Amino acid sequence: MAKITRSISAKKSSVPSVPKKVAKKAAKALPKPAKKSAKPKPWTPAEIHEAFSRFRQANPEPKGELDHLNPYTLLVAVVLSAQATDAGVNKATRALFAVADTPQKMLELGEEKVREYIKTIGLYRNKAKNVIALSEKLIAEFGSEVPRTRAEIETLPGAGRKTANVVLNMAFGEHTMAVDTHVFRVGNRTGLAPGNNVLEVELELEKVIPSEFMLHAHHWLILHGRYTCLARKPRCEVCLINDLCRWPEKTV
Ligand code: SF4
């Protein structure tokens, strides 16, 4: 194949050459190739403050949508929510948490029964195993309490950085930023916190969002992504921050 290509390109073209003057004129008449899209202008601190003031005004006390009774059940719910919807998790945990709302009760229930309660959730076998293992670890190493540091939470089976950030924020009021698929999309699309991966977006959001908004910022961004800045068809016409958003494809 390489040989053929070489022999063709080596041949002198049979197409008659265009006089330079004509070619220049034709080139001028052609539409100019679109410029490579420029990087959107970063948000100014005033714009960021404005955006979060609007979120706060619209929803002063945003709540997470995962049902839980205490830090332990929140931790379990977040572990179960990986690749599942909050509504699907809530449906399963309603009955589970009614009988097991502490690590000890979960252990007494046993892996098989936990599996039964959560079998409507994706990856339930593995998740049941993790729920039992993390309950054992909480009893053995943390006095049956959910630890308060990210590093410690991350040592629990099934819990990663995002789980730790959600628990630290919702159970203990820490200014953490859990980046899920919605927050990742909103951070990038709006230009508020562009990043190639969830960690980059998380760190950028933590850097640019004023402290006064950080307690609820995670929920505002999740809710914004879930109900307004939808993945396929963002509802730009009803978006609270449509004048500030940098997305070149926004529809307003
Ligand atoms: S204007 Fe559109 S793209 Fe921008 S944040 Fe709002 S909904 Fe999302």
Image (tube, rainbow, N blue to C red):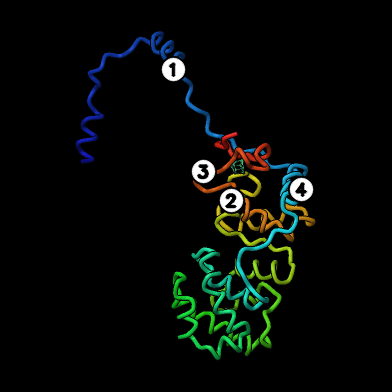
Q: Amino acid at mark 3?
A: Lys
Quadrant of the image containing the N terminus? top left
Query: Residue 43: image x %, image y %?
Result: 70, 42
For the question of whether residue 208 can be seen, the reply is no
Pick the front one: 124 or 156: 124
Q: Where is mark 2, residue-wise?
A: 227
Q: Residues within 10 Å of mark 4 (few under 14, many from 20)?
A: some
Q: Residues within 10 Å of mark 1 (few under 14, many from 20)?
A: few
Q: Where is mark 3, residue-wise?
A: 233
Q: CA distance from mark 3 to mark 4?
A: 25 Å
Pick the front one: 137 or 226: 226
Q: CA distance from mark 1 to mark 3?
A: 34 Å
Q: For mark 4, give the secondary structure.
A: helix
Q: Residues within 10 Å of mark 3 (few under 14, many from 20)?
A: few
Q: Amino acid at mark 1?
A: Leu
Q: Would residue 48 be found to the left or right of residue 199 on screen?
A: right
Q: Earlier in the sequence, mark 2 or mark 4?
A: 4
Q: Nearer the viewer, mark 2 or mark 4?
A: 2
Q: Where is mark 4, residue-wise?
A: 53
Q: Nearer the viewer, mark 1 or mark 2?
A: 2
Q: Residue at x 45, y 72 (%)?
A: 120
Ligand 1 found in image quarter: top right
Q: Residue at x 61, y 63 (%)?
A: 65
Q: For mark 3, give the secondary structure.
A: loop
For the question of whether residue 66 can be seen, the reply is yes
- Please tell me whether residue 30 is drawn above or below residue 138 in the rendered image: above
